[in-house]
Image: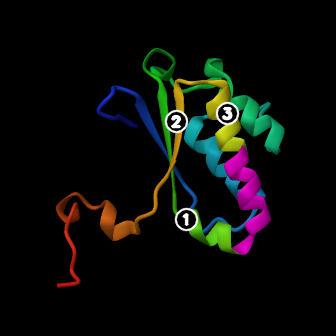
Amino acid sequence: MTQDLTGRLVVPVDLDGVTDKAGLMDRCARALALPEWFGRNWDALVDSLADRTVWPEGAVERGLLLVVRGWRAYATARPEEWVTAQEVFAEAADRTPSLTVALAVGGSAEHLPDRAGRSDRG
């Protein structure tokens, strides 16, 4: 975990290889170190994301930026579930203004520091 320019704690949620709701719930639970009682359903996810008492250490004071990456395979495999996931992220952020959820759109090569801002297209 790192912090962004505003000081918020940045937590990546890597969905690479995830193609179903169970996988999404597992990755969110792991990334955020959610408690064992986390119900692994949509309501439990929105409640956990909006509940600052279960956030990682340091996030409550600084805010939390959740960066969801590698999500395209899931969105393609389960488009209706992906719409629901986005609604859950948005509702949690609406409930808790110190939470921001961002969807990373670049591929893995674009995330490498030495490639920032570069294009190989000529």
Q: Residues within 10 Å of mark 2 (few under 14, many from 20)?
A: some
Query: In the shown orientation, is residue 7 left or right of residue 92?
Result: left
Q: What is the three-letter code of the residue carrying label 1?
A: Asp
Could you say which quadrant of the image residue 40 lies in?
Answer: top right
Q: Residue at x 75, y 64 (%)?
A: 20
SS of the residue under disc 1 = loop
Q: Is residue 7 above or below residue 61?
A: below
Q: What is the three-letter code of the residue carrying label 2?
A: Thr
Q: Nearer the viewer, residue 19 or 33?
A: 19
Q: Nearer the viewer, mark 3 or mark 1?
A: 3
Q: Position of residue 86 (x, y in %)?
A: 67, 50
Q: Position of residue 107 (x, y in %)?
A: 41, 69
Which one is earlier in the sequence, the residue at label 2 or at label 1? 1
Is 83 in the magenta?
yes
Give the alpha-carbon distance from disc 2 to disc 1, as whole Å: 20 Å
Query: In the shown orientation, is residue 64 left or right of residue 51?
Result: left
Q: Position of residue 70 (x, y in %)?
A: 52, 63
Residue 100 is marked as: 2
Q: Quadrant of the C terminus?
A: bottom left
Residue 16 is marked as: 1
Do the CB atoms of the residues marked 2 and 3 lie less than 8 Å apart?
A: no
Which span of residues is magenta-colored? Answer: 77-87
Q: Residues within 10 Å of mark 3 (few under 14, many from 20)?
A: many
SS of the residue under disc 3 = helix
Q: Residues within 10 Å of mark 1 (few under 14, many from 20)?
A: some
Q: Position of residue 42 (x, y in %)?
A: 80, 44
Q: Is residue 39 at least partly visible in the picture?
A: no
Which residue does the numbered mark 3 point to in the structure image?
92
Which one is earlier in the sequence, the residue at label 3 or at label 1? 1
Q: What is the three-letter code of the residue carrying label 3?
A: Ala
Prevalent SS, magenta region: helix
SS of the residue under disc 2 = strand
